[in-house]
Amino acid sequence: DVKVTQSSRYLVKRTGEKVFLECVQDMDHENMFWYRQDPGLGLRLIYFSYDVKMKEKGDIPEGYSVSREKKERFSLILESASTNQTSMYLCASSSGTFDGETQYFGPGTRLLVL
Amino acid sequence: DQQVKQNSPSLSVQEGRISILNCDYTNSMFDYFLWYKKYPAEGPTFLISISSIKDKNEDGRFTVFLNKSAKHLSLHIVPSQPGDSAVYFCAASASNTGNQFYFGTGTSLTVIP
């Protein structure tokens, strides 16, 4: 079974803090993704990565950065957290072996920025 | 601009009856479609998928139908069970964009015992 883990289930941070969200997958997947889920907006892609040290912007990258130093780990960084970044953050991975394959999701991190 | 739309935010169905969840898309390049199920405080889990070369895919109680001309897909759950109560997201991808998925806004299904 594919396992995608996220470092925290719940986080509370203050405005202006730097926030790190970590994601680890154990299936040697090439692709990793960060989404945020908000009511009425579904899942929106923030950043994704097809390979180590490689990153691509998704639909809403503003205010975020990412790091992929190792294949199994993909970190999302909020350089200066703001209240509009309060959300559920979901990490996903996929093998990258063919188009249209399934993405496997972690349990999510619910972030509250005060 | 939302390329994948789920116009019904919620749906209630009696246990044992059929649940039909709908999804529309605008990008004619999409050629792979998936449904995910999400319980509160958990990540989405893959449910069923369909490639554009098919118009139907069935897996147990779950069937996905694809109408390419109408750019519409639907998920049928028969019979519906209380454990099916969750938020359902449809997603689409295009071969020429690699593995990037576009998600709908979700439909919250409640199956009433």
Image (cartoon, coloured by chain):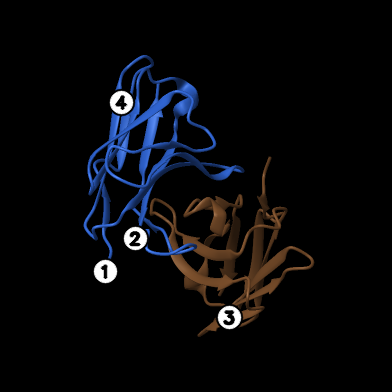
- In the displayed structure, does residue B70 sit left or right of residue A15? right
Indicate the position of residue B11 as horizontal and vertical percent values.
66, 62
Identity, as a three-letter code, of the amino acid under mark 4: Val
Q: Are marks 2 and 4 on the same chain?
A: yes
- In the displayed structure, does residue B19 sit left or right of residue B96? right
Identity, as a three-letter code, of the amino acid under mark 1: Asp
Q: Which mark is residue A19?
A: 4
Q: Tell which circle, 2 or 1, labels the residue nearer the N-terminal end.
A: 1
Residue that mark 1 sits on: A1
Q: Are marks 4 and 3 on the same chain?
A: no
Can residue A107 be spotted in the picture?
no
Q: Are marks 1 and 4 on the same chain?
A: yes
Residue that mark 3 sits on: B57
Q: What is the distance, in whole Å, between disc 1 and disc 4 at their CAs?
A: 29 Å
Q: Which mark is residue A95?
A: 2
Which residue does the image show at 40% across and 24% down from the upper left? A113
Q: Chain of mark 1?
A: A
Q: Comparing marks 2 and 1, which lies closer to the viewer?
A: 2
Q: Tell which circle, 2 or 4, labels the residue nearer the N-terminal end.
A: 4
Q: What is the distance, in whole Å, between disc 3 and disc 2 at their CAs?
A: 22 Å
Q: Tell which circle, 1 or 4, labels the residue nearer the N-terminal end.
A: 1
Which residue does the image show at 72% across and 53% down from the upper left? B26
Are discs 3 and 2 less than 8 Å apart at CB?
no
Q: Which tint was used for chain B?
A: brown
